Image (cartoon, rainbow, N blue to C red):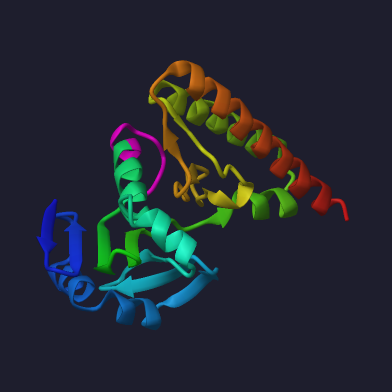
Amino acid sequence: MTSRRSLTRAAYCDASLPADLAEALWECPEELMAGAAPLQVKDLRHVACLEWASQKYVLKRYTDTTWRHAAKHSLQRSRAWKTWTISRRLADAGVATPRPVACIENCWGPLRRDSFLMYPYVEGETLRSHLVNESDAAQARGIWRQLRELWQQLRQLRVSLFDSQTRNFILCPAGRLWVIDLDKARFHWSQYFTARYQRRAWMQLLHSVDSAVRHRGM
């Protein structure tokens, strides 16, 4: 990993990232975001797909749109940094999640901050889309097996997902299930709290699965 700093910006890039892309992220990540294909636009987070040298990446921009959000995040590391840290740790431990390749933090003062996160794009369809459109029993059993294995991995690592909606999982063409959104994932100091929050995440996932299946029947 390489890092670079100025008075208003900090950048962390994986060694696998092309040098010209790392330089473009350092110079003006806003321009890269503007030129990428949008995937999701929310008040606090913009998500886009960027293609560079025949490689696809997901580029996220986290912004503080209110004084309250800005004040809260001025006391903490950026959301991009938190997701960068937990995602790389889980990917290195064998969890099926894209390993981030870049994190950019901008700061122009104590109450003005935004940040960027980049990771490889995972080809496939969301688990929700698959459940709405498919009904293959053998594949369904494989999905449930992978979800149970994922929860076991996360428990061993003392991590829970706080947003386990089916739209945050990607089923790739080879049949592997990836978790793609760890913005709200959290480490826990004890197995007790890990198990407690994992149960909550599992119930959220079941509710999301049920919603997708019911939608298929409409």
Depth order, front residue of 202/148: 202
Q: Give left or right: position of 38 versus 99.
A: right
Depth order, front residue of 72/26: 72
**Residue 108 in which image quadrant:** bottom left
Residue at x 34%, y 33% (from the top left corner): 94
Residue at x 65%, y 38% (from the top left corner): 205
Q: Position of residue 28 (x, y in %)?
A: 24, 78
Q: Position of residue 2 (x, y in %)?
A: 11, 55
Residue at x 40%, y 78% (from the top left corner): 36
Can you see residue 99? no
Which residue range is magenta in the image? Answer: 90-98
Q: Give left or right: position of 72 versus 22.
A: right
Can you see residue 160? yes
Q: Against 154, is 44 above or below? A: below
**Residue 187 in which image quadrant:** top left
Q: Give left or right: position of 112 versus 64.
A: left
Question: Is residue 95 covered in magenta?
Answer: yes
Q: Residue reaching furthest right?
A: 218
Q: Position of residue 22 (x, y in %)?
A: 18, 68
Residue at x 19%, y 54% (from the top left corner): 14
* Magenta span dominant secondary structure: loop
Tell me how many marks there are.
0
Q: Position of residue 105 (x, y in %)?
A: 26, 63
Depth order, front residue of 43/33: 43
Question: Is residue 73 covered in magenta?
Answer: no
